[in-house]
Amino acid sequence: MTIANSYATPPVDGREGPFAMPTDLLIGDAWAPSASGRRIDILDPATEQSLTSVADATVEEGIASVDAAAAAAEAWAATAPRKRADILMACYHAMMAEQEWLAQLISIENGKALPDARGEVAYAAEFFRWYAEEAVRINGELSLSPAGANKIVVQYQPIGIALLITPWNFPAAMATRKIAPALAAGCTCILKPAEETPLTALAVAEIMRRAGVPAGVVNVINTSEPGAVCSAILHDPRVRKLSFTGSTEVGRILLREAADQVISSSMELGGNAPFLVLDDADLDEAIEGAMIAKMRNAGEACTAANRFYVQRGIHDRFVAKLVERMSAMKLGRGTDPATQCGAMINRQAIDKIEQLVADALGRGAEAKLGCETPSGAGYFYPPSVIANVQPGSEILTTEVFGPVAAVIPFDAPDEAIALANATEYGLAAYVYTGDLKKGLRMAERIECGMVAVNRGLVSDAAAPFGGVKQSGLGREGAHHGLLEYCEAKYIAVSW
Ligand code: NAD
């Protein structure tokens, strides 16, 4: 297959990229430009300069991607699990072989620092390895009905064609976290990446194609009209699954769209993670965890600590140490080897951070570090700490999605739990305490899908990732993530 339009990525360690980076639509067995001739300009957030452009799919091309997924569906569902597993494992090895090149690409189009980008590639590839291992363990059930007359046979079948919609903050990992379980279950799919970061998704698709994924099993379309294109796809009766990662606002729109054809929907939505530090916590460990929970991806993570509730006995020491560590972080272009905090994704992201910080300071919070947008090109915001954030401040209820730590003191653990739960979100939470029993009891009472106790990171391909309340529906990762792409078929039988 020839690649007509491509993007020449900068050489990594003096070596050119492994292939000419496709920038068109992948529908069935061909990379092709949009028939409309439309293209989407892709910007480097560190310079605000254009990198390249990608094909901009129309509604008709959205439906063509369903045609391609439908044409490949029967053969893929009938492919032996071992064969599906082998292909997924080949994808894992192919992706890891290009870890450095992919990390550079992610860093260039998303802005994140290289260490974050390298971590993302390893995390993203792990979904291929994990689901290669799961593909051969889709076990059914056999039981006797309580009345004794019937046998109950349950078989897990592929749910059908899946539409996968991903955000820009983890352009590789959010794609593989959906594609890998879909393929392991025997489903074909259409990936619709975020407009800001399509190149990584296109690179992952080309890696998968080269690793042996058959034509039509994974289709990739970028579009400047996600509403119209995704709506058309979700109204095509051949489509049976929607998996979305992004904002709660868009998640609500998509749930309404999916309702018309009663499409099974998995939703990984926004977060507003509380980070609780109790008086008896080990200060150094809590700071270490706080730096990861706040600064991984420069705060552009749905699991990012948004609100630091710190018990009064440790509060001042925690704030002083957090300021010391945050102030030592180097802000800069993601691909610069010294950079620890990269650029934000776009101007709107900077505007939102500035507005939330201004609101908090206006209500009496203290700026301990940062809080000023640097002048010059690029969407940069410095690591920042604001203390004594007052009740009613918008930053307590809205994801800041940037390198700003908002700190609030509390007196008793019960008060901290009430504060942690005072949100419509329920994705991740963090608790630091020297008393594990107390930490586990608190974890049980915090309303969210994932709690890290004395840890700053929850993400793991082998664990069920997801939220409660308005943070989402369903789980990704672990065996749970595979079941999102399966239907339980019950066969009543006597013998
Ligand atoms: P977004 O909701 O603006 O966009 C996400 C995706 O939805 C993009 O691909 C976009 O093109 C598409 N989209 C937008 N409008 C659409 C429509 N009407 N129909 C169909 N698709 C549409 O989110 P974002 O700004 O890209 O990502 C940031 C958000 O994602 C944050 O809220 C973050 O918390 C969340 N997120 C959640 C998780 C999780 O696992 N829970 C992981 C990463 C990010």
Image (cartoon, grey):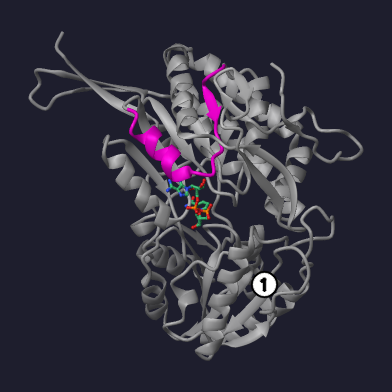
Write down the region rendered in magenta.
215-236
The residue at 69%/32% (across/down) is 95
Residue 484 visible in this rendered orientation of the protein:
no
Question: Is residue 313 in view?
Answer: yes
Determine which quarter of the picture holds residue 260.
Answer: top left
Depicted 488 relative to depicted 126: above or below: above
Where residue 283 appears, as percent x and y from the top left, is 63, 75
Closer to the camera, 33 or 492?
33
- Find residue 88 and report its horizontal and vertical position in percent: 58, 24
Locate residue 454 relative to residue 2 in the image: left or right. left
Q: Residue furthest right?
A: 14
Most extreme residue toward the front is: 36
**For this rendering, which residue is in front, 79 or 287?**
79
Q: Quadrant of the N terminus?
A: top right
Q: Which one is in front, 42 or 34?
A: 34
Instruction: Give whichever of 126, 302 is nearer the camera.
Output: 302
- Is residue 233 rendered magenta in the image? yes
- The percent coordinates of residue 101 (x first, y second) are 78, 38
Q: Where 135 sits versus 74, above or below?
A: below
Q: Residue 259 at what x, y percent from top left?
A: 27, 41
**Which residue position is annotated with label 1?**
284
Tell me the residue at 75%/74% (across/down).
374
Eyeballing the image, is 18 above or below 495?
below
* Residue 368 is inside the magenta segment: no
The C terminus: image quadrant: top left
**Element carrying mark 1:** helix
Dot 1 amino acid type: Asp
Residue 91: quadrant of the picture: top right
